[in-house]
Image (cartoon, coloured by chain):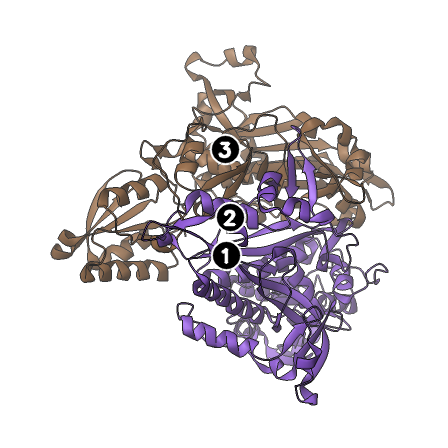
Chain colours: A brown, B purple
Amino acid sequence: MRLTNYFLPISKEVPTDAQIVSHQLMLRSGMIKQSASGIYSWLPLGLKVLQRVEKVVHEEQQKAGHLPMLMPTIQPAELWRESGRYEDYGKEMLRITDRHEREMLYGPTNEELITDIFRSFIKSYKELPKTLYHIQWKFRDEVRPRFGIMRGREFLMKDGYSFDIDRPMAINAYNRHLVSYLKTYERLGLQAIPMRADTGPIGGDYSHEFLVLAKTGESKVFYDGASQHIKLGNEYVDYEDVGGLQRTVDRFTENYARTEETHDLSLFNQLPEERQVEARGIEVGQIFYFGTKYSEAMDATVTLADGSKKLVEMGSHGIGVSRLVGALIEAHHDEDGIVWPKAVTPFHVAIVNLKQGDTEIDKVCEQIYTGITAAGLDPLYDDREERAGAKFATMDLIGIPLRVTVGPRGIREGMIEVRCRSTRTVKELPINSVVDYCIEEFRGFE
Amino acid sequence: MRLTNYFLPISKEVPTDAQIVSHQLMLRSGMIKQSASGIYSWLPLGLKVLQRVEKVVHEEQQKAGHLPMLMPTIQPAELWRESGRYEDYGKEMLRITDRHEREMLYGPTNEELITDIFRSFIKSYKELPKTLYHIQWKFRDEVRPRFGIMRGREFLMKDGYSFDIDRPMAINAYNRHLVSYLKTYERLGLQAIPMRADTGPIGGDYSHEFLVLAKTGESKVFYDGASQHIKLGNEYVDYEDVGGLQRTVDRFTENYARTEETHDLSLFNQLPEERQVEARGIEVGQIFYFGTKYSEAMDATVTLADGSKKLVEMGSHGIGVSRLVGALIEAHHDEDGIVWPKAVTPFHVAIVNLKQGDTEIDKVCEQIYTGITAAGLDPLYDDREERAGAKFATMDLIGIPLRVTVGPRGIREGMIEVRCRSTRTVKELPINSVVDYCIEEFRGFE
């Protein structure tokens, strides 16, 4: 993309109404614009990041064998009456009356709708297990929306629903979700610690939240410092291996790690003092096993081999997709702006032309631009007539991992400067090897 | 995907409440399920097609230089009061009151919201031209939703908005849209004829609708039979070439082609009688040039080189993304079910195992499955223990372009049957060449 063709309304001023750094940086870098309280438009740069996060979430869910589908945003109230949640949910539910005076709502979550789909089609135990998920916009009418898209009203969420024949299989589905979530966060460049959590309005008796540590996090968390060093890394996950999955889950959940809601001081105090960590975190996902809470209320059963009927065991599992964009910025920024991890960066390489209009320099910029594009990477070429300082500041603010600077001195010497945004280290490379260097840097992160 | 792991709730019965064939086939093939009047869930098979259509729409818009972004579904009423449309829009607009008694609405279209974004950030003529678009769910509270997703209430639409400095540039943006839409429809396997149209509640004085001819179409259309033979084919479109684009537009719009609303009998009768065609069509897109209608109401101006201010010239341009799925089925089906064009098929190759559990046959099926997957294509493997007839009927119903049948006779003779869904022709191929044949058939349609 050439910057002169793009729509990137950056701003130098720190918006006064944005309290946390991700909100400030998303506004300043032209990623989002508020259209109403807690409701945002995603401008081109923001949408690119959102889509990359969404793609990783899709891929990891499908690796775990979960099936993508798409439920609508508007739901009929009658389904929520069956589960009893229509009255329970309170003012966070956006209630709507259509032209025929039918009661509808903008879905804050989808347990009722998916259970209705399940009971309409799945009749036999042979069709289990099944996990269906979707990535769809949700609405929660927060009383005080804040922190930009981190606690907005309209937000993008991945929510998945597992259907199993009995408790052990349902726990296995829970484990698949726990591990696939860890994989997802790690791929995005985030470390999220699973913490034992309250179940809230979803219900059930078994739940973990995933918390990304960040000073600006809204949740207080307490954990065993040893948790911070547990990673999946490049470990291959075999989602068919029930025992292996359980061992992975145990490894990630055996240490004390809880949010304020479930914190148990006496347990916490049993840890060696140097491992008692109190910190703040951002919730980026939550998984629940709740057994037959919804299948009982909505009569979702399967027929067993002996002809008898059994209520299906369910769980529901969510990742805050739009919220992850904010969490990524909270975890990856410095005083100059965002520092995107390679897996989610909106552009791979920033090309800065220091003397726009100079035939030789323009030509080299075009060569690099074409080479990077041909390799399937996405360059952002600053082809404006602007001062070098302004060009550098823009690329630093929007956080592109590599910056290639083409100017008169470099051209004279046949060398090009390539700078890494995160380490701020600079390399001088021969003109002809710049494209290959960039390709190599992004291998595995296309 | 293995069918035993998939969620494909097909049905043999023709649903009595579905009046048109696309609605019937989408229900029967387990693509959608109604969750409320005019509101549908997209089951896994349906979502795959929807996503493929969406991807083609995205790609062709970006080739034309249009920038993707994403506006929210819920909009504040105040913006619609500025344009005067809040009162005008009537009962088709889903009006919502939030917990703080603020008036909101579920966007049926986005002229107001995008104009607000434009005026907030774009101040200079130098930043023009710009076209921003998004693919987002819309809601129109139809009084009588019908025809499944073809005339539903919640639907997925691509809507793009062009901003230009003057009328000639705005006409050029209109032309870019007209041609990129034609490209989109052709790539999807549809012929859509641009027809001069009324502007309706969007406003403006220049508009074309795109109609796919289909006996079940809801619109009556009148056109010069010569229009049917005009195609872009593999013609390269240079979107920078203003004159070339105009000539392409003229070629596609010079013949008489109108919908009932704009039909002019005296003009129509001037055509040679054998070229006077009356037919039915499905509207799959519409483009509008409306000048300063919204920029004037909402004060969206740019500063010119001489310091004076000028209202920006606008157009808006829509493609019915979810509706296209229905239109594709109306145009491509036979008595056995759907016949997907290669560009949008949810799976590329159907693999039918005629004797599940037979070691040799299972092995060959797995080989073919692995080979096709490794080539980046998506096979659907019917690994159920089912009669051959039921397996064939399922694959015919859901319309997979190629079917590979592996059974005892074939294995004995070392030959595999490959059948084309659309022509129903059958080829016998040596086992080892089946995968390559499939890859070759989908070259350019991955």
Q: Could you tell me residue B390's position as x and y percent?
A: 78, 66
Image check: B325 left or right of B119? right
Which class describes the residues within 10 Å of circle 1: few (<14), some (14-19), or many (20+)? many
2 and 3 marks in contact (CB < 8 Å) = no
Picture quadrant of residue B96: top right
Are the two marked residues, 2 and 1, in contact with CB atoms closer than 8 angstroms? Answer: yes
Residue at figure coordinates x 67%, y 29% from the top left = B99
From the image, state whether disc 1 or disc 3 is nearer to you: 1
The answer to which of A124 and A434 lies nearer the viewer is A434
Q: Position of residue B14 (x, y in %)?
A: 83, 63
The residue beneath circle 1 is: B314
Give the image quarter of residue B10. bottom right
Q: Is residue A348 left or right of residue A291?
A: left
The residue nearer to you, when weighing A361 against A98, is A98
Asked if the residue under mark 3 is in contact with the one under mark 1, i.e. CB atoms within 8 Å, the reply is: no
Badge 2 marks a residue whose secondary structure is helix
Q: Quadrant of the N terminus of chain A?
A: bottom left
Q: Amino acid at mark 2?
A: Thr
- For the residues tagged 1 and 3, is the chain the same? no
> Mark 2 highlights which residue?
B115
Quote the CA–CA distance across marks 2 and 3.
21 Å
> How many numbered tags mark residues here?
3
Disc 3 target residue:
A148
Can you tell which of label 2 and label 3 is closer to the viewer?
A: 2
Instruction: Say which chain tag 2 marks.
Output: B
2 or 1: tag closer to the N-terminus: 2
Q: Position of residue A443 (x, y in %)?
A: 37, 52
Tell me where residue A217 appears, x and y as whole percent.
48, 25
Q: Is residue A367 above or below residue A267?
A: below
Q: Nearer the viewer, residue B108 or A179?
A: B108
The residue located at (68%, 49%) in the rendering is B89
Q: Amino acid at mark 1?
A: Met
